[in-house]
Amino acid sequence: MFNYIPGYILYLTAIIASALVSAYSVRKILLITRSRKIYDLPDDTRKIHGGGIPSLGGIGIFIGYIMIATFFWPGRPMFANYIIPSTILLFFTGIYDDLMNMRPYKKLVAQLLASAITVYFADIRIVSLNGIFGIGELPYLTSCFLTTLGCTLFINAFNFIDGIDGLACVMALLYTMIPGVLFGIMHVDGVAWVCFSLAGATLGLLFYNIAPAKIYMGDTGSMLLGFTIFVLSVLFIKEYGTHSSELPMIHSPQAAMMIAFSILFMPVYDALRVFILRASRGISPFKADRTHLHYYLLDAGFTHSQSVLIIFTINILIIAAAYLMQDLNPVVTLSGMVLLASMALLVIYILRQKHLAKATPLPRNIPGKGAGAQSAI
């Protein structure tokens, strides 16, 4: 149908069309939520916005993405029969959670079910570690289990970065545009169109989500994005195996896997770091606090937009490092990514401590109570 149209024209059309549909949908959602006073209220811990702001922006992403992706991916039963139903399951789970605060275990069941449907029925799974850690092809059940678990973990890791204005949207653009370009180079057009459709839908929300945000994506958007981004990453690893000759800048299946992981690295690194930190303090890994990297940046005195730019830049540097180290042992490449992220975290932590120290009033003498007496400010 579209064989006579250059690929880049179709990709650009997918971005623009999904962005327009998404932006229009978000605008209507804003009007409805404001008129019905459906707000996400601040709690002075993680939700630090100044007043009630709607958190159903993910509906706009869903509408823009599904409308355009289904139009540009004809004749793909895998997409229609399995990925879309899984996406719809997470979409309605997110809406319920944003409106009613679903219990975490129920949300986890929905995430596992959506992941398992895609892994088992669509057969989108990590079939081999390509010699990483000395592990080659995985047994079928092990492959299904690890991919389902990985997808569920990434859904939650991506959800965690949706903490400040614009961050999740900007990172989602990075996580969809790079795979979209790679799929385009490999001429896997259907998957490339899906990447660019999701990127455009996210761009439509970003217009309203950039600081100061008028609306949040909520779990409705973050779970949809986290799930689809992970699926696209696994598809990239799978498709590279049959299209490696068309992507000579990536030298091996090992390198393809490490580059795919580097794209998703920051949410995973931050989530694991926070889980370990909370567990070491004897508290639930799922207990909300301000130990995520984006809160450290805010505590260090950076604005929302500056924090987004810093995290975006760190992730770009990690992707570049993975690409430059692709011919090394994968363990060395992974260690390099962890070291780079840890160095950035250390710098941010030091800046945070200095800023908090300056912001805390110093003790002062209280007249009439002796020179050694101090106030407890």
Image (cartoon, grey):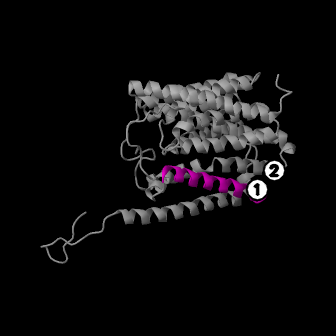
Q: Which mark is residue 252?
A: 2
Regarding mark 2 in the picture, which secondary structure is present there?
Answer: loop
Q: Please name whichever residue, 162 or 203, is drawn nearer the observer in this view of the structure.
A: 203
Q: Percent x, y for residue 374?
A: 21, 70
Number of residues whose C-alpha sits closer than 10 Å to that of mark 1, classed few (under 14), some (14–19) or many (20 or more): many
**Residue 145 or 344: which is nearer the viewer?**
344
Q: Quadrant of the N terminus?
A: top right
Q: Which residues are magenta?
A: 303-328
Most common secondary structure along the magenta stretch: helix
Judge whether 320 appears above or below 186 on screen.
below
Mark 1 residue type: Gln
Percent from the top left, x then y, of residue 103? Answer: 42, 32
Compare residues 169 and 255 and report the one nearer the observer.
169
Residue at image location 60% in from the left, 45% down from the top: 171
| Residue 112 versus residue 342 in the image, above or below | above
* Label 1 secondary element: loop
Distance of label 2 from label 1 (alpha carbons)? 8 Å
The extreme left residue here reads 368
Disc 1 marks which residue? 326
Q: Amino acid at mark 2?
A: Ser
Of callouts 2 and 1, which one flags the residue occurring earlier in the amino acid sequence?
2
Numbered badge on residue 280? none
* Residue 77 appears anywhere in the view: yes
Location of residue 105 in the rendering, given as x and y in whole percent from the top left corner: 46, 34
Q: Position of residue 100 (x, y in %)?
A: 41, 28
Residue at image position (49%, 36%) is 216
Q: Is residue 113 visible?
A: no
Left or right: where 232 falls relative to 345: right
Mark 2–mark 1 CB contact (< 8 Å) = yes
